Amino acid sequence: MAPPQLLSDFMRLMLLLAPSAAIICLVLAGLSLRQGSIPDALIGSNFAKWMFWAVVFLTLPQLISWFPSFGVPAPLPGGGVGTGWMANLQTDVANFVQNFVMNRLALTFAAFFVLRAILDTVQGGHPLPSILGAMFLLAIQTTVNLIQSYNSGTSYATADALDSLWNYTAGTICPIAAGLAIIGAIWNFVGRRPVMPLVGATLGLLTVSAIWKLVTSMM
Amino acid sequence: MTFYHGILNLTNWAGNVILPTLGGLFIVFAVIQFARGYQHLYSTWAYGGLMCLMVSGLLRMFEKFTGQAGWNNPDLYWNSLLNLVDWFANVVLPVYAGMHVAVGAMKFAGLFEHQVHQQFNHARHFVGATLCLLASGLLRLAEFFVSKGAAGVR
């Protein structure tokens, strides 16, 4: 028996709104990046959680394709939403997220983070978390495109996207972060603060993949 | 606008624009600390100023240390630490030894007595005044050393 039209349209509505939900998750991830120190924010904080949910929303159809293997037939309806008011709702929500949340609100949050960075420095704190948070918020659209480009289209798409994001972080972002660590080491040296943690971190940031291989070879 | 370009440009800006400028400030601080007789402080500022001019070189050095084995070699971190220790032991320490031999020889010859007790000596003020007038020259000298030092990296 075919599912009712309203139910199918509701499913289409939810699936079509998944990218918008991912954008909201990325905005929340960017806001979380400012909380605490950078390592705390990346691992064990809300940033990792929101990034995970962004990936899940962007790979939702592939993730749902696991349901038949659990004995739950879940054919995904294709095409657009047939019911008029639901189609309008989908368009309005997508426009709201795209034009208001991402293009305007995230931009304003980023501007406030730049201000926050200056105020952090005034208080003797570190401006880097706020600056990185601002950059992340400004780059939400390209981050969405990046995650979508990592979608393999298979049932393993969620794990593939997370794997690819790890590779991107380890292979592209970490070597650049090593440069920042060197700058931090010089700054600490002049300020007579410990230098060796940042020297070790520089070596670690340049050898992330090798450390991963080391850990797996120890198992 | 990508996060990659953002963090890349931030690193380039901090390393190639801000730190070399601050390096000049640190050398000025070193001269001031020297003139005030704070011997335990001025060398930190002076080395800090020199390192500010060498950010790119230091990063290339660490990349060299971490590039001696394959990216997926489990021993790469150990190898990198080994290269770091090797560099300190076989490059930095011999240079440091040369400096100490030179200072020892100068002390032995009695040429360095005024500098040894300079915080109690009038000579410190004259040397400090001279260095205050030579701040730009000191910075150019440090830049000269750094640019010449790149020849050894290749």
Image: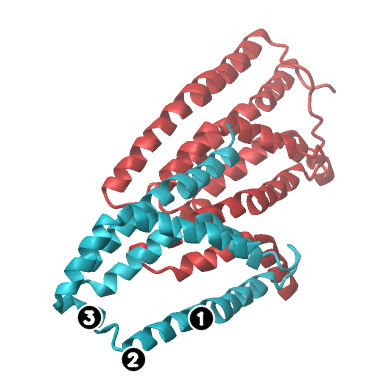
Chain colours: A red, B cyan
Label 1 lies in what chain? Answer: B
Crowdedness near tag 3: few (<14), some (14–19) or many (≥20) residues, C-alpha within 10 Å:
some
Of residues A101 and A164, the one drawn nearer to the viewer in this rendering = A164
Residue shown at 61%/45% (left/top)? A52
The vertical placement of A38 against A95, above or below, is below
**Circle 2 is placed at which residue position?**
B108
Q: Is residue A218 visible?
A: yes
Specify the amino acid type for callout 2. Answer: Phe
> Where does the image place residue A103, in percent across and percent down from the top left?
51, 23
Do dots 1 and 3 share one subunit? yes
> Where does the image place residue B85, in percent across and percent down from the top left?
57, 78
Of residues A74 and A22, the one drawn nearer to the viewer in this rendering = A22
The vertical placement of B90 against A37, above or below, is below
**Mark toward the start of the polypeptide (2 vs 3):** 2
Label 2 lies in what chain? Answer: B
Q: Quadrant of the C terminus of chain A?
A: bottom right
Residue shown at 76%/18% (left/top)? A4
Label 3 lies in what chain? Answer: B
Q: Quadrant of the N terminus of chain A?
A: top right
**Circle 3 is placed at which residue position?**
B114
Left/right of residue B1 with respect to residue A7 in the rendered view: left
Q: Is residue A189 visible?
A: no
Residue B93 tag number: 1
The residues tagged by marks 1 and 2 sit, at their Cα atoms, a distance apart of: 22 Å
> Where does the image place residue A71, in percent across and percent down from the top left?
83, 43
Crowdedness near tag 2: few (<14), some (14–19) or many (≥20) residues, C-alpha within 10 Å:
few
Left/right of residue A80 with respect to residue B89 in the rendered view: right
Specify the amino acid type for callout 3. Answer: His
